[in-house]
Amino acid sequence: MENSKNKIELVSIAMATYNGEQFIEKQLDSLLAQTYSNLEIIISDDGSTDSTVAIVERYMKAFASISLFKNPLKNGINKNFENAIKHCNGDFIALCDQDDIWLPQKIEILVNNIGSAALVYHNSLFIDADENSMGRTIADKLNCYSGQDSKTFLLLNCVSGHECMFAKRLVNIALPIPSAKYFDWWLAFVAAENGGLKYIDEVLVHYRQHEKSKTDMLALKKTTKHKKEFLIYEEELEWYNSCAKVASLNKSFYELWAKYYKQRKNQWFSFSLFLLARKNAKTLYFIKKKSSISRFFESLKLLWGLKMKTFFG
């Protein structure tokens, strides 16, 4: 059963590819098997050097719904998704990785459930490179949020790109995507500020985890050295300033947060930021499946100014 409205909205599937020859055929097959009929598949390739483009071009010859746009230079995942989104014509846009497997009813269920929300998303099952279930879902790891409080997404994200579909009206607000965080985190934040998010507690994607995955939610990759404190600080400050720039419902909060965070650079202690975090702890630390005590210790990390962290680091 498709959307009960007289008009069957066009849904654009925006896929970002880069050297994805190993898994992309399975993913494309799962997109073409969707029960929702009014679809276009927009693919942006970020300079693949393997057979990814050749595979996509072969599918394009067989299916008119698929379009390919190639970046002349490698731009990274955020800009690659941004390029795909720019070419989407649909009333709704669903983001898509190159290596997962979508269940056939995914788009149909999302269209029928988005309602007045700006973005709708669902649960996903982790699978390994050989498509074996890993026995865990994203909702097993994180609390998934529905609502309109964007502070939920200031410190953590529970919306993976492959899970979400959003209304096209978000595009003019969300683009360009800032570089400080991943594209899906930014879209979740913008959606919360502009109509809210709705979560569907249903597995609609088999989410492949492997060594080449961009995200590593199960911590399967080898760890590397932590970034220098000042680099982390600059990235976080850029993120908070980006949030303050587009915020409307909570603009004063984000301006204050960015102000206090900026002051951390020359402080031994950041009492103002710590107290602001404690005041909003229920929202800021909602996503992590942690006790109230654990959340307190999370906010305690904000008490230390950068002088203190680097002095003892």
Image: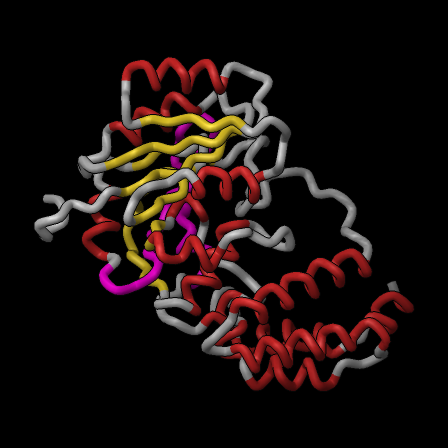
Residue beneath the point at 58% across and 25% down: 47
Determine if the magenta segment contains residue 2.
Answer: no
Tell me the quadrant of the picture where the N terminus can be found: top left
Residue 250 image position (x, y, % from top left): 50, 78
What is the span of residues highlighted in magenta in the rendered image? 115-143
Residue 18 image position (x, y, % from top left): 54, 28
Q: Is residue 158 visible?
A: no
Tell me the quadrant of the picture where the C terminus can be found: bottom right
Query: Relative to 284, is 175 above or below?
Result: above
Asked whether 227 or 47 is in front, the reply is 47
Q: Left or right of 256: which side holds 195?
A: left
Q: Left or right of 115: which side holds 243?
A: right
Query: Relative to 265, is 94 above or below?
Result: above
Residue 235 image position (x, y, % from top left): 71, 58
Residue 132 image position (x, y, % from top left): 40, 31
Asked whether 11 or 173 is in front, the reply is 173
Determine if the magenta segment contains residue 121.
Answer: yes
Residue beneath the point at 63% across and 31% down: 74
